[in-house]
Amino acid sequence: MPRSGSGKELLRCLEFVARTHHRDFNEAAVLAGLPLENHDLTPSVFERAAQRLKLASKIVQRSVEDINPALLPAIVLLTNNRACVVHSIDKAKGSAEVIYPELNDAATEIALDDIAEQANGYIIYCRPEFDFDKRADDTFKANHRHWFWGVIRENRKLYKDVLIAALLINIFALAMPLFVMNVYDRVVPNQATETLWVLAVGAFVAITADMVLRLMRTWYVDLAANRTDVKVSSSILQRVLAMRMADAPQATGSFVSGIQGFESVRQFFSSASVNALVDLPFVVFFIAVIAIINPYLALPIIVGALLLFLHALATQHKMRSMAEDSMRASAMRNASLVEAVGSLALVKTFNGQSKAQATWEKSTIYISRSAARMRVLSASLATSGTWIQQTVAISMIIIGVYLVIAGNLTVGGIIAAYLLSSRAMAPIGQAASLLGQYHTAATAMKSLNDVMARESEGNDDASKQSKPILNGHIQFKNVSFAYSNDTPEALSNVSFEINPGEKVAILGRNGSGKSSITRLIMGLYHPQKGQVRVDNIDLQQINLTQLRRNIGYLPQDADLMFGTIQDNITMPSETLHAEQLVQVANQVGLANVTNRYPDGLNHMIQERGRNVSGGQRQLIALARALINDPPMIILDEPTGSLDHSSEDQLKRTLLENTKVKTLIVVTHKTSMLDLVERIIVVDSGKIVADGKKDDVLHALRSGRVGAG
């Protein structure tokens, strides 16, 4: 895959092509969740970005002179990690109309030879996909592409080559039986050594071709499997990261175990399995060839195949049940492991080792027994298949002897039929032995279908409104919200409005709904009733990636990711200068922490920030919230783990840096109220007070309003 380090140029080229084809371009939607390098678009992920604009794209290795004029405009990748758009070509003049991103879409006429000198040999063609409008009946609309089978269909050319190779391999499989039959029936009786050599050369050519075709078939299957693995694995993680918080798994370990089940699906589509299944239809071909030699010789194979099929059919229900039970037990075991390791200090402190060990061992014993029973069933199919295959061979020889005595068959015919019988029975036995693997893969597919069916936040939806810069006007209109259908409402008929630049504190008892308000503003959840609006736009109509870029958010639980302190702080930042990072670290008081480490901001943080104190975690999370200098800042208990000195420094920083910003502070500390001019009091999911700070505080002190 070619590289184009100037991802911004490539993105601007995509934008020009999209607008040429009348596609609305929303940069945040186009790039949301893609594996960018330094926040830049690269050719390796260009196709996925174009798909979000309903553009079909393909990167081809081609010179500028060979560009197909019917497919213009096309993107030309240039040397020095640059890109441009060729809008039109005039072959008579030997020139082209080119758009360079740095010239703001202005067209420039350049000689084809000059463009060819700059090009690196790769062209990206983009064409619009067909759009069905609302008049089209859903019955006639194209089906949505399945997350797995859609990728398999992308590789249909490779699988077509696999089928062609399988056809030729099975035709060449006739070479040895026919060679042996002719040697015994014609060469030996007539001592025709010249014919022997002709037949031998033909057989050698056939087995050599067979070897080459087998290697090619295996290579094609593995190539298709690798392509599928990369694309499907990427789409699974993309779906997981894009799913709504309302659909987030309750048990992380079991959820991850279900995703890991894709490994069994991938293994089932490996070369061994696919080759066995592709060879299965040719059983009929070999039976027909044997029947040509003598119809009676085909009877044992037909009976043997039916017996093996009935045996496999009888074990289906049990194998399917064991595969499902085994996967559930594996998910439970994985969940207990993740929970125990993630809460290791808790387990040790309250002596929970015995319970965790018992849960693990109970699940392991069950999984081991299920696996053993599955292996026994699979072994019974394999051994019965071997026994049936050998019985079929013996039966054919017995029938063949009687046919030879009766003068209806030659000795060479018996040997040829015997060799062909093994080729006929082998695919049936292999397919039967794959049943256990099939049921494991089918169970994993069900689990993955559930994951892929979960609703997405829609950050890659280009139809959502693009708002790169927000003013900070927040409105709640009759909002009612519950985290699930079986939990009470966290908010009930809540309405309020926060103007741009306003400083507001939200007070209330534990569980009153304060954090729920902040999560709704962040778009992490959507209300069941009412509207949450930012800058007069319903949050469900705005691109959430852009929304979150405009909000500096400190959640109540200041979680950190594995990586350096700098990695954690710069997570939301696309472009950052070192001076910015140092400045923010100093502002929140983080410099006092990093100065203690020899590697400073490059100090490594363990998962969830386990190797730093709660206060240090909070300072890092605060720096992360402020690093982009956003117009809105939402802080949920920002000083809960800070000492008085750190709290005072944070207050000074916020007073200085939020003069023109919208600030929302959820707090239990009255000292933090110095930052605000208005207070909203929440109790049992309802707003019980909303007004100027002094008025609300007076009401609270006089007992006219209840809050914690």
Image: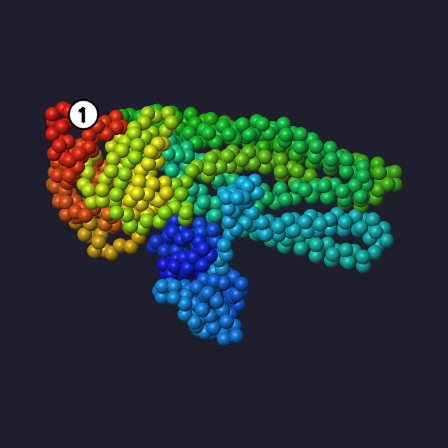
Q: Which residue is mark 1?
A: 706
Give 584 or 368, whichever is nearer the viewer: 584
Q: Residue furthest front?
A: 135
Residue at 55 percent across and 31 percent down: it is: 375
Side of 617 where 183 appears, left or right = right
Residue at 43 percent across and 27 percent down: it is: 363
Give 421 or 640, whichever is nearer the viewer: 640
Q: Position of residue 343 (x, y in %)?
A: 30, 32
Side of 310 where 572 appears, left or right = left
Residue at 80 percent across and 50 percent down: it is: 182
Residue at 73 percent across and 33 percent down: it is: 303
In this picture the colour scheme is: rainbow
Q: Residue furthest bottom?
A: 93
Secondary-structure class at tag 1? loop
Q: Position of residue 523 (x, y in %)?
A: 33, 39
In the figure, residue 41 lies in which quadrant? Answer: bottom left
Q: Is residue 253 visible?
A: no
Residue 519, relative to residue 205: is it above or below? above
Q: How many numbered callouts?
A: 1
Quadrant containing the C terminus is top left
Q: Indicate the amino acid at tag 1.
A: Gly
Q: Is residue 699 visible?
A: yes
Side of 498 where 158 appears, left or right = right
Q: Position of residue 400 (x, y in %)?
A: 81, 38
